[in-house]
Amino acid sequence: MFVFANFLLAVAKVADILLTIYLYIIIARAIISWVNPDPYNPIVNFLYRSTEPLLSRVRRILPDLGGLDLSPIIVMVAIYFLQSFVVRSIYDLAYKMKIGIGGMP
């Protein structure tokens, strides 16, 4: 059982790291949007390609606010929720499994 608990701990840690990296990518994208970046710059191109699929879905749901784009904020709140609820729940489950509390024999 401890092997599965260690696996869950590893999954939770990797998910936490990936969500944190994506959060920083979203923040960089929001900062880049304040200036007129060169669209042929590889970093700008990467930021747009890695964030636009998710941000465009959020923009479709949000009402039109006349040029004010709140989609990065919504995505950052969603990432924070995933880290606070889902990742921590996996951590808690793994620790309970490790010490033998969890309802599993």
Image (spheres, helix red, strand yellow):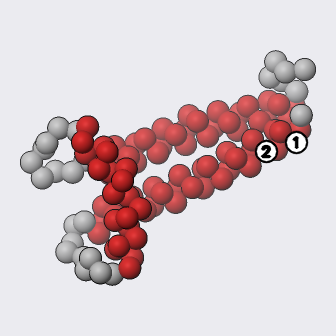
Label disc, if present, on residue 93 of the rendered structure: none
Q: Quadrant of residue 58?
A: top left
On the question of residue 105 being in view, the answer is: yes
| 68 shown above or below 89 | below
Q: Which residue is mark 1?
A: 3
| Residue 7 at x, y percent in the picture | 79, 45
Label 1, residues with CA under 10 Å away: few <14, some 14-19, many ≥20: few
On the question of residue 28 being in view, the answer is: no
Q: Secondary structure at mark 2?
A: helix
In the picture, measured across the screen, residue 42 lies left or right of residue 95, that is: left
Q: Are marks 2 and 1 in contact (CB under 8 Å)?
A: yes
| Residue 103 at x, y percent in the picture | 82, 18
Q: What residue is at 85 percent from the left and 35 percent from the top?
A: 98
| 90 shown above or below 16 | above
| 48 shown above or below 64 | below
Q: What residue is at 21 percent from the left and 72 percent from the top?
A: 35
Q: Which residue is mark 2?
A: 7
Q: Quadrant of residue 8?
A: top right
